[in-house]
Image (spheres, rainbow, N blue to C red):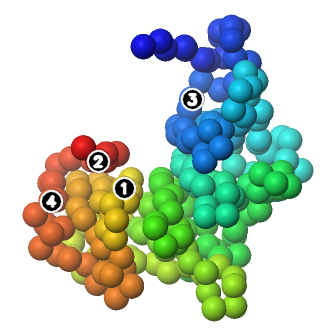
Amino acid sequence: NHFTHINTRTHGAYSGLTSDYIQTIFLDSHQNLWAGSWDKGLFFLKKGSTHFINYSPNNTNGIFTANTVMSIDEGPNGDIWIGSYRNGLYTYRPGTGDFAHHGDIVGQNGPNGYFIWKILFDNDGDLWMGTTKGLYRVYRSKNGGLSVKGLQEGMQKEYDNPVTANHILSLKNRGNNFILNGVGSVYPFSRREANSGECNSKSANECSGTNTSTSGVAED
């Protein structure tokens, strides 16, 4: 195995990366690499290229205003979705090179302005967001627009500590179920429960920790 260290101080095979504080990386369906940073926005490395392209508030005409990118995923139509720290949710359309800020759908009822830790598309093409204000589902409404639904109320019924229910650090998709984890808990959560607004307390409590903050999960 061979590892290449890419940072702002080495000027070898790769160029253009101007941040050493990378929070997340994502490989899209075309094998392009996306990297979200804490202080310099979003970086893009096209397959076969050795130069990172940066997208930040300084070079996107004020549309992409997030310096801190926490999570990246690809939608069913190939759009790149971006969850940010205190700047809400964005999409990037590779075909046109345009950014869009979805403050209209995650403003009043969603986590716009809150810390979006993780975004994840499920097998039905719905987007899920783990935030410091709980779990949200973004889906297509009957008129073709986007709608958002918060799951905090159902989750809070099962926990005495609202931090456990509201602070979702990571999501893992497993068929029709998710594995959620947050401050002091790791537990399964089904999309059926999400649609009904209820939570499976038995499964949640069996998998829950008491003094652990888990920031990632993986399938064995």
Q: Foreground: 29 or 155?
A: 29
Q: Nearer the viewer, mark 2 or mark 3?
A: 2
Q: Residue at x 61, y 61 (%)?
A: 75
Tags 1 and 2 touching, CB below 8 Å: yes
Gap between marks 1 and 2 measured at Cα: 8 Å
Q: Foreground: 18 or 28?
A: 28
Which of the marked residues, 1 or 3, is nearer the chain's N terminus? 3
Q: Which residue is mark 1?
A: 172
Gap between marks 2 and 3 measured at Cα: 26 Å
Relative height, residue 211 to residue 13 (above, below): below
Which of the marked residues, 3 or 4, is nearer the chain's N terminus? 3
Amino acid found under the numbered disc labelled 4? Cys
Relative height, residue 157 to residue 216 (above, below): below
Gap between marks 1 and 3 measured at Cα: 24 Å
Q: Residue at x 76, y 42 (%)?
A: 56
Query: Where does the image place residue 15, in percent across and percent down from the top left?
Result: 74, 18
Query: Where does the image place residue 42, in percent across and percent down from the top left?
Result: 68, 41
Check disc 3 and report its element: helix, strand or loop: loop
Specify whether residue 38 is in view.
no
Q: Quadrant of residue 6?
A: top right
Amino acid found under the numbered disc labelled 1? Lys
Q: Which residue is mark 3?
A: 21
Gap between marks 3 and 4 measured at Cα: 32 Å
Tags 4 and 2 touching, CB below 8 Å: no
Q: Which mark is residue 207?
A: 4
Check disc 1 and report its element: helix, strand or loop: strand
Q: Residues within 10 Å of mark 1 (few under 14, many from 20)?
A: many
Gap between marks 4 and 2 measured at Cα: 15 Å
Q: Is residue 57 left or right of residue 1?
A: right
Quarter of the image for the C terminus: give it: top left
Specify whether residue 26 is in view.
yes
